[in-house]
Image: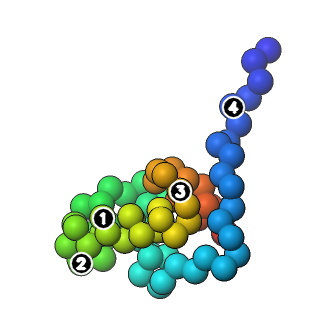
Amino acid sequence: PAAPPRAPVVEAPPDAVRLTRRETQVAELVAEGLANQQIADRLVIARRTAEGHVERILSKLGFSNRSQIAAWVTAQR
């Protein structure tokens, strides 16, 4: 039988990485599967502001895509 699918491997960022309170909120919403416009609507901010938060989160954590943010948020819980 085929092996069960495995979760993607996500390297943990350095312990010194700290997200701001707003970045943490955005990361949680990314983990819920929300798009930038949905995040903007939920937080009552501009779509471009939401995009900027996502870009900074990716940069701070050394990630290249939103699914890595979602996996990281899940691992932090």
Quarter location, residue 55 = bottom left
Q: Residues within 10 Å of mark 1 (few under 14, many from 20)?
A: some
Q: Residues within 10 Å of mark 3 (few under 14, many from 20)?
A: some
Q: Is residue 31 above or below residue 46?
A: above
Callout 3: helix, strand or loop? Answer: loop
Q: Which residue is mark 4?
A: 5
Disc 1 residue type (three-letter): Glu
Q: How far apart are the two marked residues, 1 and 2, measured between alpha carbons?
A: 13 Å
Mark positioned earlier in the residue sequence (3 or 2)? 2
Mark positioned earlier in the residue sequence (1 or 2)? 2
* Residue closer to the observer: 1 or 16: 16
Which disc number belongs to residue 44? 2
Would you say the residues marked 3 and 1 are in contact, meaning their CB atoms lie under 8 Å apart?
Answer: no
Q: Is residue 21 above or below residue 33?
A: below
Is residue 23 in view? yes
Q: How far apart are the two marked residues, 3 and 4, measured between alpha carbons?
A: 22 Å
Q: Which residue is mark 3?
A: 63
Q: Residue at x 37, y 71 (%)?
A: 53
Mark positioned earlier in the residue sequence (4 or 2)? 4
Q: How far apart are the two marked residues, 4 and 2, measured between alpha carbons?
A: 37 Å
Disc 4 residue type (three-letter): Pro
Q: Which residue is mark 1?
A: 51
Q: How far apart are the two marked residues, 3 and 2, measured between alpha carbons?
A: 26 Å
Residue at the bottom extreme of this rendering: 21
- Image coordinates of residue 22 in percent, x first then y, are 42, 81
